[in-house]
Amino acid sequence: MKSIILTQTTKFLTPAFVILSLFITYRGHNLPGGGFIGGLMLSTAFALLAVSDGVEKARHALRVSPEFLIAAGLCIALISGLPALLGDDAFMKSLWLPEFSLPLLGKIHLGTPIVFDIGVFMTVAGFTLKVFFSLCREEEN
């Protein structure tokens, strides 16, 4: 049964979850949060969309396949450890860019940990959505 309340609420919650997942991923290398929680929040947004409007609409809204997210996320997480290794240091050692400020965001502190978090974010979101979409497809049959 399709619920108009769920469908209308999903239109507002999906973008909010996506933005919140990106924020939690970004702040995770300094505060609680990070790629794992951000990835779960992103997959929650698309799972909610799948429940309200169907799996195909959620897959279309995602724009890339969950398998691509998994593969790209693993590659990005692996690549995040290479700069230290190439600089004669330990694999996955944190390297940081000089801190800078942006008008609305304040101080920005970027480095290899955020790149690793982005890889984890993509991998977790891709895996969770792959499992969820597969379970939804099984239920439809």
Image (cartoon, rainbow, N blue to C red):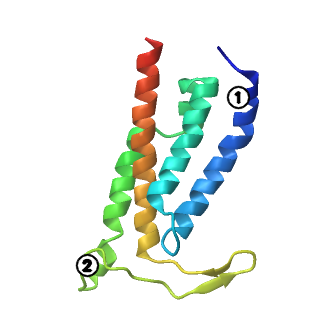
Expressed as whole percent of the image width and height from the top left, the position of residue 47 reads: 54, 35
Instruction: Residue 13: name its quadrant.
Output: top right
State how far apart marks 1 and 2 are (Cα). 49 Å
Amino acid beneath label 1: Leu
Expressed as whole percent of the image width and height from the top left, the position of residue 32 reads: 51, 68
Q: Residue at x 52, y 88 (%)?
A: 98
User: Is disc 1 placed on a helix, strand or loop?
Assistant: helix
Instruction: Residue 22: name its quadrant.
Output: bottom right
Expressed as whole percent of the image width and height from the top left, the position of residue 56 reads: 55, 25
Q: Nearer the viewer, residue 135 or 63?
A: 135
Look at mark 1 in the image and give the residue it sits on.
Answer: 6
Q: Residue at x 42, y 41 (%)?
A: 128
- Horizontally, is 141 left or right of 85 in the view? right
Amino acid beneath label 2: Leu
- Horizontally, is 14 left or right of 38 in the view? right
Q: Nearer the viewer, residue 116 or 138?
A: 138
User: Is disc 2 placed on a helix, strand or loop?
Assistant: helix
Q: Residue at x 70, y 28 (%)?
A: 6
Give the vertical position of 29 relative to 57 (above or below).
below
Instruction: Residue 2: name its quadrant.
Output: top right
Question: Residue 85, which numbered label?
Answer: 2
* Crowd tier of the residue under label 1, counting other residues whose Cα lies within 10 Å: few below 14, some 14–19, many 20 or above: some
| Quarter the C terminus occupies | top left
- Horizontally, is 90 left or right of 136 in the view? left
